[in-house]
Amino acid sequence: MVFALESLDCSQNLKEIFRILFYESYEAKISAYEILSEQEFEFSEEDLHEINQMWEDINLHPEKCPNYEYEEVPKMIQNAVEGYMSYLAEKIKSTNR
């Protein structure tokens, strides 16, 4: 099912795609990562904070994330999270100027 999402417009579903990346099977994670890498999304600062909170929770409780024990899984997730969190950091930086 996630593979089919790659051909659809997921621009309104950033948090849902991250939930797949965090909580679903290895194959679903790969598809979610591809979607996050290739599509553009509309999101709020609150969405990014929620995504970051989910990631922090997984780092504290890796058993919540299937296949976390595979070296590439946390690296892939960290890469995706950092990509979106850098947007938030830049926005905060420009607001404080």
Image (cartoon, helix red, strand yellow):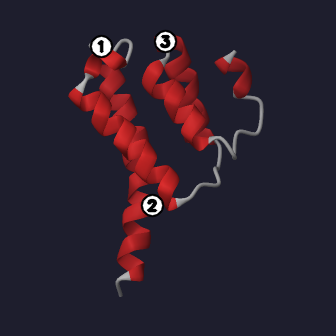
**Residue for point 49% across, 12% down:** 25
Please name the residue that numbered disc 1 is placed on.
70
Q: Between label 3 and label 1, give the one nearer the viewer.
A: 3
On screen, residue 78 versus residue 18, left or right, reads left
> Horizontally, is 36 left or right of 42 in the view?
left
Classed neighbour count for the residue bearing mark 1: other residues with Cα under 10 Å, few (<14), some (14–19), many (≥20): few
Identity of the amino acid at label 1? Tyr
Q: Which mark is residue 25?
A: 3
* Image x and y of residue 89, in percent: 36, 64
Q: At which x and y percent is residue 77?
A: 39, 32
Amino acid type of the residue tagged 2 in the rendering: Tyr
| Quadrant in the rendering for residue 59 | top left
Give whichever of 74, 51 is nearer the camera.
51
Residue 47 placement (x, y as % from top left): 51, 51
Q: Amino acid at mark 3?
A: Ser
Residue displayed at 40% across by 54% down: 85
Q: Quarter holding the C terminus? A: bottom left
Q: Is residue 95 above or below residue 22?
A: below
Q: Secondary structure at mark 2?
A: helix
Whether residue 71 appears in this view of the structure is no
The residue wearing badge 2 is 87
- Establish if 34 lies above or below 49: above
Residue found at the far left of this picture: 60
Tell me: 95 left or right of 40: left
Q: Earlier in the sequence, mark 2 or mark 3?
A: 3
Residue density around tag 2, few if under 14, some if 14–19, many if 20 or more, within 10 Å: few
Q: Residue furthest right?
A: 8
Compared with 89, 14 (above or below) is above
